Amino acid sequence: MSDSVKAAAMPLDSRRQPIEELSINTIRTLSMDAVQKANSGHPGTPMALAPVAYTIFERFLRHNPKNAKWANRDRFVLSNGHASMLLYSMLYLTGYGLTLDDLKAFRQWQSKTPGHPEYGHTAGVETTTGPLGQGISNSVGMAIAERWLAAHFNRPGHEIFDYTTYVICGDGDLMEGVSHETAALVGHLGLSNLVWLYDNNHITIEGKTSLAYSDDVQKRFEGYHWNVLHVTDANNLDQIAAALTTATTKPDKPTMIIVDSHIGYGAPTRQDTKEAHGEPLGEQEIEGAKKFYGWPPNEKFLVPPEVLEHMRKAEERGKSWEAAWNVKFAAYQAAFPELAREWEMIANHELPEGWDAEIPVFPADAKGLASRESSGKVLNAIAKHVPWLLGGSADLAPSTKTLLAGEKDFEKDSYGGRNFHFGIREHGMASILNGMAVSGLRPYGAGFLIFSDYARAGIRLSALMNLPVIHYFTHDSIGLGEDGPTHQPIEHFMTLRAIPRLLFLRPADANEVSEMWRVIMKLTHRPAVLALSRQALPTFDRTKYGSAAGVQKGAYILADCEGTPEVILLSAGSEVHLCVAAYETLKSEGIRARVVSMPCWELFEEQPAEYREKVLPNAVRARLAVEAGTNLGWEHYTGLDGDVICHADFGASAPAGELFKQFGFTPENVAAKARKLAREGK
């Protein structure tokens, strides 16, 4: 049945309800019905928060359902993504292209309505939510992006960016540690364009929140320098609207609105229970709830035509708002053509002409540079030409070498700054970067590789959302030395290489760093993790060895022999120079050896089979991999007949040179193992 035909079956007495109440109950019943049909999902929160979502979309959100990517739209994030039917119901009713059939296919194969909202999959979903704490933290990146875009592009009389980000969140979001990291930073930065609405329903999956949660949310957020408001009844539209009005006119603070609600509102026996949170209500309970709403109890997926007509007015409002903005942008384009072109490049994921003109070529140098040093030089060379390449570190910029020279800090009095100070908040930093990236910026966030553990949830979501975030880590191995095992990555290369869609790059020298950045900057729908050394790495003589441009294929022949190799040495990052030194020894002994530098496995695996066979011919079974970390994964390249020099236990506190010697990472040991493989096999 079509929407209008189905709705025609609705009794006249129900149609006489005020349109707002009728619309809200439509949101509730659609959500209940979809969860019940799927026999899976979370009905209670949509039932409770339908009035809140309705008020945001109907009275406050400037958006265009017919163009979900309109540049100056307000953003809406459902951070408690398990309540996804609340969002899908709103997107359907306001005209984002979802159909009733899509709602009926909730949580089914290839549907547009997956269990949790997924960025890039469903129009109107601003970010992937579900892992609690991530949505609210992504929203911080969105608010930061608006402030930066406004500071960079707006001119007197030509204010083209001025949007607000609205977020609904729950107890789980606020319990997760990442929320503390990002909320504190928001308050410090005074991001008044950010509004969080907290669903204070006192229920989690296990039962009452009092089992594990007794935070004073108001005092907590006041301590973070937020404006805190309280709506005592989630069904009171006037209270909700008054709070949102105050929030959007507060000039110097973000706003937290605490909304008292009843999960499973209207369900006869399940209102305010844990059962309403994460499982279908059951037909009998749904019938009881519908009777409570004054709804035909046996109708399913019922949409009154006047509700659809009322809520689809969002299309006309959105069309009008975007048209007015387009006029404003045309005037801006005429007045500031270069800036307008910059925005178009951001929106289209383009790079300026000559963006790589100043990327350095490093001369051969036996002493060389730490790859963190060379990367800092390349980063600054590119940043001169790409104004929207911006970022910072988790309080480690002097060590990560990620400060942009001559640029201001992004702070409350300088939102146009490009140097960010995330504080000691790696998890928050990674999540914020995702919010910046969905807003079009090219953000990077830096720290020590060991602390990628803290950032991993955000890194994984960068990959899941296909965002070109640059996760920038230094101190990538036992080579950092004296700080000891707490700071020395061991398993981290492999755990990061295991994340789908993510590029993990570990360059071997300064020129590999330069080529690595050429790869990274061209990414438009894929994140990258950089793993850079603290210690100096020799800069190879490229007139003698292979071109560093091979980085763009993930792996390449760095040093070779005449004819078929007897043994192939494989490595990445700081251990490649050990293989090159061993190669020279083997060469002097008449052993035909090849060195393959493998800075990015993922790129190598995407090359044609012919190229991969050329670099690693199947006929050569004697292969030795060398990496200062666990051996997991290398066996894919060494095979059963090969071997690996690795370190599968934790490190120790000592100078880097001593550690490499003690753990067998020396040219002599590499040469000895390779010699044995070539002459005797494993």
Image (cartoon, rainbow, N blue to C red):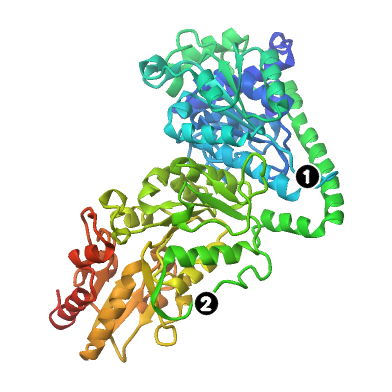
Q: Quadrant of residue 121?
A: top right
Write the residue at 74% across / 30% down.
312
Labels 2 & 1 near each other (Cβ < 8 A): no
- Left or right of 536 in this view: 173: right
Looking at the rendered structure, the kind of residue marked 2 is: Val
How packed mark 1 is, by other alpha carbons closer than 10 Å (few <14, some 14-19, many 20 or more), is some
Residue nearest the observer in this picture, 524 or 415: 415
Give x and y (percent) for residue 71. Answer: 72, 45
Q: Is residue 287 above or below residue 153?
A: above
Disc 2 to disc 1, how far (Cα)?
Answer: 40 Å
Specify whether residue 403 is in view.
Answer: yes
- Left or right of 565 in this view: 79: right
Q: Secondary structure at mark 1?
A: loop
Looking at the rendered structure, the kind of residue marked 1 is: Ile
Write the residue at 36% across / 54% down.
498
Write the residue at 47% across / 68% down.
513
- Left or right of 184 in this view: 195: right
Give x and y (percent) for residue 680. Answer: 12, 80
Give x and y (percent) for residue 332. Answer: 83, 51
Residue nearest the observer in this picture, 364 or 390: 364
Image quarter of the N terminus: top right
How packed mark 2 is, by other alpha carbons closer than 10 Å (few <14, some 14-19, many 20 or more), is few
- On residue 160, the disc is 1
Label 2 vs label 1, nearer the camera: 2
- On residue 402, the disc is none
Residue nearest the observer in this picture, 69 or 405: 405
Look at mark 2 in the image and give the residue it sits on.
Answer: 361
Q: Quadrant of residue 162?
A: top right
- Left or right of 587 in this view: 524: right
